[in-house]
Image (cartoon, rainbow, N blue to C red):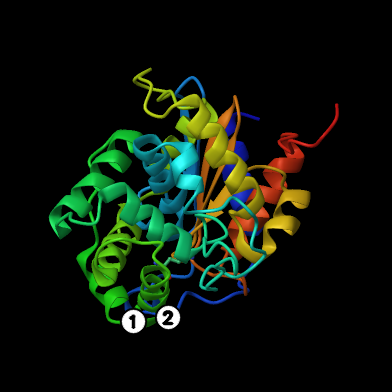
Amino acid sequence: TPIPDYLTEILDSVRDIKDGEVADYIPALKDADPNLLGIAMTTAEGHTYSAGDVEAEFSIQSMSKPFAYAATLTDRGIDFVETKIDVEPSGDAFNDLSIEEDTKRPKNAMINAGAILAHQMLIGEDATMQERVDRVTDFFSALAGRKLTMDKEVFQSEMDHSHRNLAFAHMLTSYGMMEGKAHEAVAGYTAQCSILVNVQDIAMMSATLATGGVHPVTGERVIKRSVVRHVLSVMASSGMYDSAGEWFTDVGIPAKSGVAGGILGAIPGQLGVGVFSPLLDSHGNSVRGVEVFKRMSSDMSMHMMEVD
Ligand code: GLN
């Protein structure tokens, strides 16, 4: 079957799944249409195939973490960043503190504490709000190949309910792990999470991870090879939070989910994949999204531990 038909068929096979809940921790996400369902994949050669609700926009949320982390590693160096943020799977939920008792480092950059610190290290503690928004929006836009924007309503809604992230930021500050003002770090991180994408953007952004850092369409090197290897490794062990082990055994590719219902995956050397559907399981991962990846992984032999 031609690829678009195959993608439509996969979506149809999960369309009847109505399990899960939309994210309800902020009003702006609670109103999402639970029926939305879309998929896109971009090959290492830059061809994009998609099906379903391909134009629907949603906030990138935690799928921003691997890209912001990549930018931080690029600017500050892998060795230095590792003195501040560890690379160990936490096995915890995204909103668990997960700070190491002895070194006070967040366990990894895929959980909130690590991502807030990565954002602050990327931007520099003195940056203005505009500089923070511009830095992440420009980088994500370069990866997506179109100008992305921030959803102000999601941002504001999230800021009104960011007590927990503020607490993490204050902890990191009190441990001497983070410089600057804690609330500015959280505001910048929240803006980063509020950038709007569709599944095609996500597939394109992930494809640059799949190629080892070369943009599949422009052919430009956007991220260093060593940085991509590092980011994909952390995604593989920690990208799906407290279901990372189950995800890797079932699907077997580095991935990252976001609470708006997106999941991105990167198959090294081959593909970037983006799936979107708002109903979430108890780990905060899209229920249909997980099913779509499971099916694709088995149909297309994507599992990286598959010996053939
Ligand atoms: N902005 C969300 C938060 O920090 C992102 C969480 C997520 O997507 N898992 O709580």
From mark 1 to mark 2, how far is it between C-alphas? 8 Å
Q: Residue at x 55, y 56 (%)?
A: 108
Q: What kind of element bears circle 1?
A: loop
Q: Quick one: SS at disc 2?
A: loop
Tell me residue 190's x, y (percent).
Answer: 31, 65
Q: In front: 28, or 299?
A: 28
Q: Quadrant of the N terminus?
A: top right
Residue 175's place in the image compared with 48, above or below, is below
Q: Which residue is mark 1?
A: 161
Mark 1 and 2 residues: CB-CB less than 8 Å, in contact? yes
Tell me the residue that label 2 is attached to.
25
Res 15 seen here? no
Q: Position of residue 32 (x, y in %)?
A: 39, 71
Judged by depth in the image, the label closer to the viewer, 1 or 2, is: 1
Number of numbered discs: 2
Residue 141 percent location from the top left of the image? 28, 40
Q: Amino acid at mark 2?
A: Tyr
Density class for disc 1 (Cα within 10 Å; few <14, some 14-19, many ≥20) is: few
Query: In the image, what residue occupies the spot 24% across and 62% down?
Result: 151
Q: Nearer the viewer, residue 248 or 127?
A: 127
Q: Is residue 50 above or below residue 249?
A: above
Mark 2 beta carbon near ligand 1 (under 8 Å): yes
Instruction: Please tell me which residue is depicted at 68% across the width and 57% down the height of the picture.
Output: 244
Q: Amino acid at mark 1?
A: His
Q: Quadrant of residue 75?
A: top left
- Nearer to us in this view, 50 or 228: 228
Residue 264 visible in image: yes
Depth check, front residue: 84 or 164 = 84
